[in-house]
Image: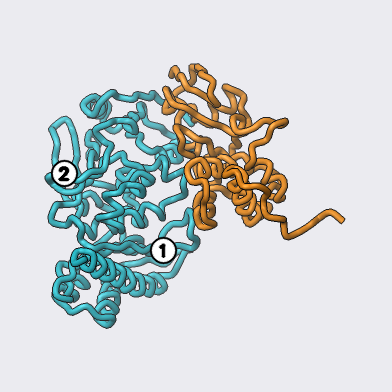
């Protein structure tokens, strides 16, 4: 690795001040599972690496007044173990479990996965289906925006060099919305998704209400299948309706052919995974309805 | 240069290293703890696995500066040649080691698992070892070795007899 300076700021304010001072010549280090790999091979390294991995402001997973807040530097392993997430948003736990392996899940962070902005990221579809928002801090203060606005194109987010992602929030209205995540890779461990799907839907009077379907690895960024969602909204729960939503979702995606899979194969996967993920979310909705009665 | 104070295998140590030094490089080249192996250097192979504050991590993906004030356990802290850890002993007995390069990393992953979960399922073991690549033996014997070690660590008597008796 080429030489750089390392700073571990004592708090978020100090971190933001460093980013303001150094701009594009600074890089944020959280989990390091992508950054250190990048630096290892890089001809040019940043002037200063700002280590935010131990900042308390970026840690913690808890239900707050605004919804469920996940600190940006929460690791995938922390997400898998969070009782709140296991209980309220199994899709996020499932997605975290498919990232890398134990060693990388103990280092890699949720925000780190999002800011790589690769189309195959596993955190994206589940969070998009749950209409997550992201909190951002900069010298101009704190702001909040929908997660979808973070993704610009492969490896390009809308973050400015002096902005740092501080939290991911699932809005209060979606607390406990039944969700599911499925990924298809070429192996179980350490494999990139050929396709991944996150879904969330309320089931009321046996009908889909506000269904959300998000797809990864099949477009330049993680995307919502809005036509499939519109089709499903208000429909009675049935195998046919879920299968049709899968077919529509497959037509909305723009998968590419590469050495991992052909575009046609990826479209077939979207159909199947969407249908199965919806069925899982429905089963979870029915289970929690049963528990509510009991 | 960055000053690092870190507890390694129970012993407080200090070092002053360039900022771009990885934890793996700190261990191998500064403290001469060469049990942790440099395989891929990009977090895929797991040969560099060490335990930091109780959690297994790829030491090639951490900067030395990031373990300041923390506790690191390496393979050198698990057992000694004359006093092997049950996991090491069972790896030997099960024939889970061929060239041995991946061994230290696999054993660190197994140790982290058993420290937390004394009675893991095969699925748990597979998941815990999924970040460690072995290019010689395959993984079945490793999984058996971890199961055997778990039995011993739980205080159960003998490990189940091996299916293949090589003697006679």
Image point (60%, 37%), residue name: B37
Quadrant (top left, top right, bottom left, bottom right) of the C terminus of chain A: bottom left
In the displayed image of the protein, which residue is found farthest to the bottom?
Answer: A240
Q: Are marks 2 and 1 in contact (CB under 8 Å)?
A: no
Left or right: A176 as drawn, with respect to B128: left
Residue A62 to residue A235: above or below: above
Instruction: Pick whichever of labels 2 and 1 is earlier in the sequence.
Output: 2
- Could you say whether the residue bearing mark 2 is in a helix, strand or loop? strand
Residue A162 percent coordinates (x, y): 23, 33
- Could you say whether the residue bearing mark 1 is in a helix, strand or loop? strand
Identify the disc placed on residue B126. none
Identify the disc placed on residue A64. 2
Residue A170 to residue B6: above or below: below
Which quarter of the figure has residue A20? top left
Residue on which the image places disc 1 = A194
Q: CA distance from mark 2 to mark 1?
A: 35 Å
């Amino acid at each position: 690795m080429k030489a750089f300076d390392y700073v571990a700021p004592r708090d978020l304010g100090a971190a933001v001040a460093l980013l303001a001072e150094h701009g594009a010549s600074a890089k944020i280090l959280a989990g390091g599972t992508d950054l250190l790999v990048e630096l290892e091979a890089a001809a040019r390294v940043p002037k200063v690496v700002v280590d935010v991995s131990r900042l308390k402001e970026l840690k913690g997973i808890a239900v707050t007044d605004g919804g469920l807040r996940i600190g940006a530097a929460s690791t995938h392993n922390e997400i898998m173990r969070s009782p709140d997430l296991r209980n309220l948003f199994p899709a996020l736990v499932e997605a975290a479990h498919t990232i890398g392996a134990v060693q990388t899940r103990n280092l890699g962070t949720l925000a780190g996965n999002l800011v790589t902005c690769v189309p195959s990221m596993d955190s994206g579809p589940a969070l998009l289906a749950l209409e997550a928002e992201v909190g951002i801090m900069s010298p101009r203060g704190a702001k909040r925006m929908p997660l979808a606005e973070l993704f610009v194109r492969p490896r390009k987010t809308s973050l400015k060099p002096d902005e740092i992602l501080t939290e991911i929030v699932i809005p209060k209205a979606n607390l406990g919305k039944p969700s599911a995540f499925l990924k298809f890779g070429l192996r179980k461990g350490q494999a990139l998704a050929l396709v991944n799907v996150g879904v969330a839907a309320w089931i009321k009077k046996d009908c889909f209400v506000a269904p959300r379907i998000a797809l990864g690895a099949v477009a330049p960024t993680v995307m919502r299948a809005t036509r499939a969602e519109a089709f499903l909204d208000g429909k009675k729960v049935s195998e046919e309706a879920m299968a049709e939503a899968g077919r529509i979702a497959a037509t909305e995606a723009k998968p590419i052919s590469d050495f991992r899979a052909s575009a046609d194969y990826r479209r077939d996967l979207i159909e199947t995974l969407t249908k199965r993920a919806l069925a899982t979310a429905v089963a979870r909705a029915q289970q929690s309805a049963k528990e509510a009665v009991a | 240069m960055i000053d690092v104070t870190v507890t390694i295998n129970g012993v407080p140590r200090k070092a002053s290293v360039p900022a771009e030094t990885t934890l793996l490089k700190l261990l191998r080249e500064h403290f001469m703890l060469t049990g942790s192996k440099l395989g891929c250097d990009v977090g895929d192979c797991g040969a560099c696995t060490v335990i930091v504050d109780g959690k297994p991590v790829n030491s090639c993906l951490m900067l030395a500066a990031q373990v300041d004030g923390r506790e690191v356990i390496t393979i050198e802290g698990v057992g000694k040649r004359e006093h092997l850890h049950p996991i090491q002993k069972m790896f030997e007995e099960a024939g889970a080691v061929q060239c041995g390069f991946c061994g230290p990393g696999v054993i660190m992953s197994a140790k982290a698992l058993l420290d937390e979960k004394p009675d893991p399922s095969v699925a748990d073991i597979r998941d815990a070892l999924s970040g460690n690549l072995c290019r010689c033996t395959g993984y079945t014997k490793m999984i058996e070795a971890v199961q055997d070690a778990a039995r011993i660590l739980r205080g159960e008597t003998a490990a189940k007899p091996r299916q293949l008796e090589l003697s006679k």
